Image (cartoon, grey):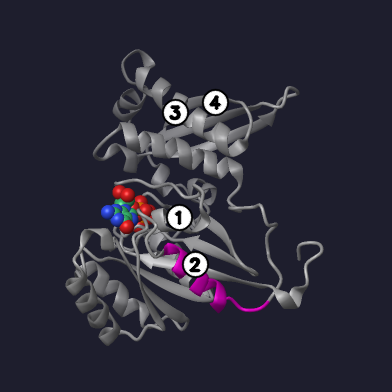
């Protein structure tokens, strides 16, 4: 418990957000927390680990578990991500189903709803991206979904504009069980800084390189050393599967990796709140997606 707090007066609990890739989970958590804790990308399956955001509303602390998008897993890495997503749902006090209202109840959403029926937790429905859909369609979608699976509440929000997000947070806060806060008030994420730093670099790879490559790469923070002048020296390795991919990441005369490093360094310096010296290395590891050690670094269990 955080010092000086009356246990009886506070609430604290976990909310797992479940949704199809690109439903807007990362955007919503960032908006609920009010700070960038989970990377956001227009590409699907950006989130691999359960990065948590921690929001405070009145006397309640709400710990959000950001789960990887649910999809039909084929590769081993994909299976690990999906298992981790549903594991998070089973442990939470509340499960929030996030739906991209513009896409509505498509095949992917249907599959999630069917699976969600087996999760014995309080469920709420969050219809996102209402800035992109007309009201009539939205109401029809809400009643359609509630007919398939009863939800305790339905929220209509835009994670992007912030519309409805404050009401959602207040409602979630009221549903948290009584108990001491698990984290200090000023902490917004319990993901270790080095993991967040790796996520940031991965985000920059996503931004600069297109098509398959980002899915064929992973980033790890190898060292994080505090220097006497207060700055930190960080070394990270980008693993790719083939030498041709290594060349793409490096770019002509190392231009691409330099640009990735520069923008990653700026953002890591922001979260670390100090000056950062970032060193990036690119390594070819043909079978990284079959190597248990890479999974542990991402906080995932290795599916046998
Ligand atoms: N117009 C609109 N776009 C949104 C809204 N919420 C999210 N988006 C966009 O939808 C895309 C996907 O958002 P993310 O937050 O990365 O989605 P996610 O569900 O976390 O995706 P994964 O982490 O890959 O599973 C991004 O381009 C967001 O800007 C919204 O309310 N309105």
Marks 1 and 2: CB-CB under 8 Å? no
Q: Which residue is mark 4?
A: 278
Q: Is residue 62 above or below residue 26?
A: below
The picture quadrant where one finds residue 162 is: bottom left
Q: Which residues are magenta?
A: 165-178
Circle 2 crowding by C-alpha within 10 Å: few under 14, some 14–19, many from 20: some
Q: Is residue 103 visible?
A: yes
Numbered badge on residue 263 = 3
Q: CA distance from mark 2 to mark 4?
A: 36 Å
Q: CA distance from mark 3 to mark 1?
A: 22 Å
Front tag of 3 and 1? 1
Mark 2 near ligand 1 (CB under 8 Å)? no
Mark 1 near ligand 1 (CB under 8 Å)? no
> Of callouts 3 and 1, which one flags the residue occurring earlier in the amino acid sequence?
1
Q: State the quadrant of the C terminus.
A: bottom left
Residue 48 coordinates in the image, percent (x, y): 43, 52
Front tag of 2 and 3? 2
The residue at the far right in this view is: 4
Q: Is residue 1 above or below residue 204?
A: below
Q: Is residue 77 visible?
A: no
Q: Is residue 119 left or right of residue 13?
A: left
Q: Which residue is mark 1?
A: 31
Q: CA distance from mark 1 to mark 2?
A: 10 Å
> Of callouts 4 and 3, which one flags the residue occurring earlier in the amino acid sequence?
3
> Of callouts 2 and 3, which one flags the residue occurring earlier in the amino acid sequence?
2
Q: Which residue is mark 2?
A: 169
> Of callouts 2 and 4, which one flags the residue occurring earlier in the amino acid sequence?
2
The picture quadrant where one finds residue 174 is: bottom right
Numbered badge on residue 177 = none
Q: Is residue 79 above or below residue 135?
A: above
Front tag of 4 and 1? 1
> Of callouts 1 and 2, which one flags the residue occurring earlier in the amino acid sequence?
1
């Amino acid at each position: 418990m955080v010092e000086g707090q009356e246990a009886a007066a506070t609430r604290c609990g976990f909310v797992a957000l479940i949704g199809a890739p690109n439903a807007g989970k990362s955007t919503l958590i960032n908006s609920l927390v009010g700070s960038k804790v989970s990377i956001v990308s227009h590409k699907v399956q950006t989130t691999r680990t359960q990065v948590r955001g921690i929001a405070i509303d009145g006397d309640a602390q709400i710990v959000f578990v950001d789960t990887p998008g649910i999809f039909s897993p084929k590769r081993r890495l994909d299976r690990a991500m999906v298992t981790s997503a549903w594991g998070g749902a089973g442990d939470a006090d509340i499960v929030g189903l996030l739906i991209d209202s513009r896409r509505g109840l498509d095949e992917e959403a249907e599959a999630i709803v069917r699976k969600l029926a087996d999760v014995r937790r309080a469920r709420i429905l969050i219809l996102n991206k209402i800035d992109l859909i007309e009201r009539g369609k939205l109401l029809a979608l809400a009643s359609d979904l509630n007919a398939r699976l009863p939800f305790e509440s339905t929220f209509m929000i835009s994670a992007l504009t912030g519309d409805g997000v404050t009401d959602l947070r207040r409602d979630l806060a009221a549903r948290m069980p009584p108990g001491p806060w698990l984290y200090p008030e000023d902490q917004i994420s319990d993901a270790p800084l080095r993991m967040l730093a790796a996520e940031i670099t991965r985000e920059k790879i996503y931004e600069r390189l297109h098509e398959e490559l980002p899915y064929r790469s992973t980033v790890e923070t190898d060292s994080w050393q505090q220097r006497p002048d207060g700055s930190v020296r960080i070394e990270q390795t980008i693993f790719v599967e083939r030498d041709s991919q290594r060349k793409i990441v490096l770019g002509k005369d190392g231009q691409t990796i330099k640009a990735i490093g520069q923008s990653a360094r700026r953002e890591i310096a922001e979260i670390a709140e100090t000056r950062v010296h970032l060193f990036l290395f690119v390594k070819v590891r043909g079978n990284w997606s079959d190597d248990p050690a890479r999974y542990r670094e991402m906080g995932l269990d290795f599916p046998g």
